[in-house]
Image (tube, helix red, strand yellow):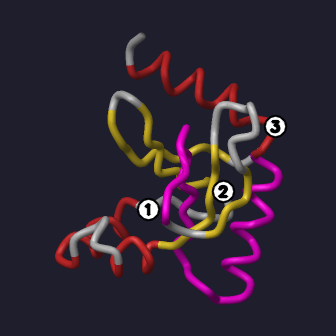
Amino acid sequence: MDVKEQYHQLEVELKPFLPMLAKAADAILDQEISKYPIFTVCKEELAIGLPLIENDGSAWSINATTLEEFATKNLIEPDKVENFRSVYKEPTENLCLFVVDKSGATFIFLPRI
C-alpha cells in the first residue's frame, strides 16, 4: 500500500472520530492551553497526552496533546519547534495527527468536517 492509499485508509478509519477530535482541539484552543493541538493516533497505548479513545477493538487509540508536550518530552527537538510551527496548519480548519503504526511515525493534517 503506498502513502496515498495509507492516508486515505486512515482518513476513512478516523472519520467517525473527527467531530470529537475537533471539539477537543477547540477546547485546547479556547482554554488557551496551546495554539498547537496534536492528536496521537496509535494501535498501542502511548504515554503522551490525555486519552480520548482507547483501543477497544477499534483499530486506534487517540490521545490529545500539544506541541509544548512534544517539545518537553523531546519528541520534537528544541531547535525544530519553530520549523514545526511554520508548517502547522490552521487548527480551526485542520486536525494535526501524529500517527504511529508499523511503518513508522509521521505527522499528518486532516481537514475538519
Q: Amino acid at mark 1?
A: Tyr
Q: In the image, residue 2 lies at what x, y percent? A: 38, 14
Q: Which sits in the foreground, 32 or 51? A: 51
Q: In the image, residue 37 lies at what x, y percent? A: 57, 69
Name the element at disc 3.
helix
Q: CA distance from mark 1 to mark 2?
A: 11 Å
What residue would you read off at disc 3? 16
> Tag 2 or tag 1, which sits nearer the N-term?
1
Displayed quadrant of residue 52: bottom right
Q: Amino acid at mark 3?
A: Pro
What residue occupies the far bottom of the structure in this picture? 32
Is the C terminus in the top left, top right, bottom left or bottom right quadrant?
A: top right
Left or right of 40, for residue 101:
left
Q: CA distance from mark 3 to mark 1?
A: 23 Å
What residue would you read off at disc 2? 93
Q: Is residue 14 above or below residue 91?
A: above
Q: CA distance from mark 3 to mark 2?
A: 17 Å
Q: For residue 34: magenta?
A: yes
Q: Which residues are magenta?
A: 18-47
Displayed quadrant of residue 70: bottom left
Name the element at disc 1.
loop
Name the element at disc 2.
loop
> Tag 2 or tag 3, which sits nearer the N-term?
3
Q: Nearer the viewer, mark 3 or mark 1?
A: 3
- How many neighbours does mark 3 have within 10 angstroms: few (below 14), some (14-19), or many (20 or more)? few
Residue at image position (63%, 31%) is 11
What residue would you read off at disc 1? 88
Q: Amino acid at mark 2?
A: Glu
Left or right of 47, for residue 78:
left
Q: Which sits in the foreground, 90 or 102? A: 102
Residue at image position (62%, 59%) is 63
